[in-house]
Image (cartoon, grey):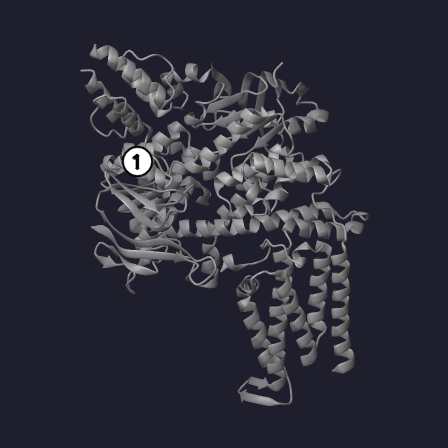
Amino acid sequence: MGIIKASKVVFEYIRRDEEGNVDSIQTAVDHVDLDVKEGDFVVILGHNGSGKSTLAKQLNALLVPSEGTLWVDGKDTKERKNVRDVRRKAGMVFQNPDNQIIASVVEEDVGFGPENLGVPTEEIWKRVGESLTSVGMLKFRRHSPNKLSGGQKQRVAIAGVMAMEPKCIVLDEPTAMLDPKGRKEVLSAVHELNRKKGITVILITHYMEEAVDGDYIYVMDEGKVVMEGLPKEIFSKVEELKRHRLDVPQATLLAYELKKAGLPLSEGILTRQELAEELERCYVNYSK
Amino acid sequence: MSIILNNVSFTYGEGTAYEMQALKNVTLKIDDGEFIGIIGHTGSGKSTLIQHLNGLMKAVSGEIYFNGRDIYEEDFDLRELRTRVGLVFQYPEHQLFETTVFNDVCFGPMNQGFDKNEAGLRAFEALRMAGVPEKLYYQPPFDLSGGQKRRVAIAGVLAMKPEVLILDEPTAGLDPKGRDEILDLIAGMHKSKKMTVILVSHSMEDVAKYVQRIIVMDEGQVFLDGAPREVFKYYKELEKIGLCAPEVTYLMEDLKARGMAIDGDATTVEEAKQSILKLFQ
Amino acid sequence: MLRDITLGQYYPGNSPVHKLDPRVKLFGALVYIVSLFVFRGILGFLLATVFLIFVIKICQVPFRFMVKGLKAIVILMAFTAVFNLFLTPGEHVLFHYGIFTITMEGVKNAAFMLIRLTYLIVGTSVMTLTTTPNQLTDGLEKALKPLSKIGVPVHAVSMMMSIALRFIPILIEETDIIMKAQMARGANFEEGSLIVRAKNMIPLLVPLFISAFRRADDLAMAMEARCYEGGEGRTKMRPLKYQGLDYGAYVLLLAYLGGIIFLRFFIV
């Protein structure tokens, strides 16, 4: 079993009227199966309202499945006694950088998690230093979060999770409110944690460029996993992605258009370099 | 009809420790019916610039002329200017406050002094223009989806019938489809209503695809100003100030570097496709 | 004007005042406030001034940061001064016109009241500028700990305070944006009668409240995700323990208070 495993997970938002009768049921997550290997970088794609955020909250036991079972590091999230372990093992970073920083000084915020876990003071300081270093924010340790850029704030939030020494980080649209520079900062910090520390990453996003470097992609729509596979496999299905209100990176789109126009390009082109190489190959053949 | 900025400068917190010059001697002419994109990294002065265009911020020095009149003249009505130069802020849905979508869109026209009927008519027209489905008109705006809320907020500005429409990152936080829908909507208004549109964006791809003219801001100054093809030729200079060109522009350069005789400086997927296909004819 | 509130704005530094235990600083602020209302006469005033200047000097926070807080209460100060000026009865009439009378005592009262208010703001801002909100609430929590025995949720209250302090600047900025956005739709916050103006605030207040609730919701979730379950079983990054410096500060504070009381009751 992988570090995260979901079996037929269903989550329903139930709306009740004033008398407590069920008014409407909205199935936000609909029979989802996941199996995430430890150390993987997994991307969950989906448009706004596709259920991806609701799923993310399940991974952290902020919500528990209405039906089905979800295991984080072998622990069933539905069991009340496992909640703390689940949250420690699978830390969570949210979309809005301002609304997840609790303290008014960077290092105090990073220490918040370990404090809650009852980690001894000296150990907290050690962890705070290490976590801030791992996201390149050590020199801002005494700054006020209000004076940081969006990308820096998100890196502080990531450090706050790292200080709890998780095995896995779930990031729920961490770049949606950032500018391109901030987006790059956050992405490279997350990739580095994945590469150097072997942290399992689950990145929830609707930016296609961020999914290209993932190990595995799940695409969600209407609460269901509608596509899954390697980036190459997913991005070769341009039409299908568009049906799910998504798109593909520009290089992939161009390759797709060129193929449609008759150029013999190979499948699954994701990056500019790949496309340039392919085009050169075609061009050489054509010139002959 | 035009907006002219003559040597406009603005400084935050003048005379305090936080003094920061946000605009430095900006001189610009924005003509009637243009579709302009403003790009620049965070803190380059984009937001400050657009808030000058409708008189929300007042320049420390320099003049701004709207249709030939100095907006800093004493008898110039700044509130009226704001109705003629509509500004849609970032995440505009956060400013919705009325009990229904319809009432919220009426807010602008009512402030302009129109009676209920006229304001209602304008609201209807604006909501239709913004593509809000009719069944949502009398719902609380807070119950709508993110994309719909944003349309309502844009309608709230359109209802004032502005001649110039400025949008600060109208696609922030939207998914790809939502983004395309909003941008198509904006482009449609530019085309059919002959509105002057100014789009502030972080996405080079979006700007390249839609606008006719790009203004690049850096450190409070106009760094580059021209058609997308012209501006993105300077991709190396853009990188120096923390920006970049669209992905396909780089691809074109890659292909040239590989010795392929490709012509043009494509900035959109469509242009790139045409240039590449020409190679194989 | 909203931006000028210094409350809750920590100014990073490494001065002895920064290093003091927050409980000492809380006590110090309290002592200082008390002393301002105890002192009378020029000597007491001098002592309070010297003490304030001394503390400001050693805390290494630029003076202008402290005075910034004053801007927010200029109106309150003006009111106080005017009331004192005109409403203090006394023998030495300086000026008389119709119902307006200014006496020597009035001038004196107004002057002292202004000084008191100024010192109060500056004095308390020394505390807020040199203590992070978290330390401050830690201090409060620990100082008020005995109250939790009688059922007062001391930890929850102090946590709430510290979060409120963190979000003040964010909400201020947000107010500014919403205000501008509504002005871009022709809203007018500056003209009209009091009732009209109050009504005109709705487009500002509703979005602000909604946003505050949304933030509160997000924040609660973020805290839960980081295993926050109330005060039980938590450890502290900065456990509060008195050092030599703290005892010294206590002695100094008590000496100061003694001095003020002495001047009040035995000299003047």
Identify the amino acid type marked 1. Tyr
Considering depth in this image, is B233 or C52 the residue closer to the camera? B233
Q: Compared with residue C76, is residue A173 higher up or lower down, i.e. above or below? A: above
Residue positioned 54% across, 51% down in the render: C169
Find residue A97 and report its horizontal and vertical position in percent: 52, 39
In this image, A126 relative to A30: left or right?
A: right
Q: Quadrant of the C terminus of chain B?
A: top left
Left or right, residue B97 beside residue C220: left
Q: Residue at x 69, y 48 (%)?
A: C157
Frontmost residue, B137 versus A167: A167
Indicate the position of residue A252 as horizontal and vertical percent values.
35, 20
Instruction: Return the x and y of residue C32 as percentages of the image width and height.
Output: 70, 66
> Counting other residues with Cα less than 10 Å from the Cα at mark 1, is it few (<14), some (14-19), or many (20 or more)?
some
How many numbered markers are drawn?
Answer: 1
Which residue corresponds to the image point at 54% horizontal and 72% vertical from the top-left?
C78
Which residue was labeled with disc 1? B235
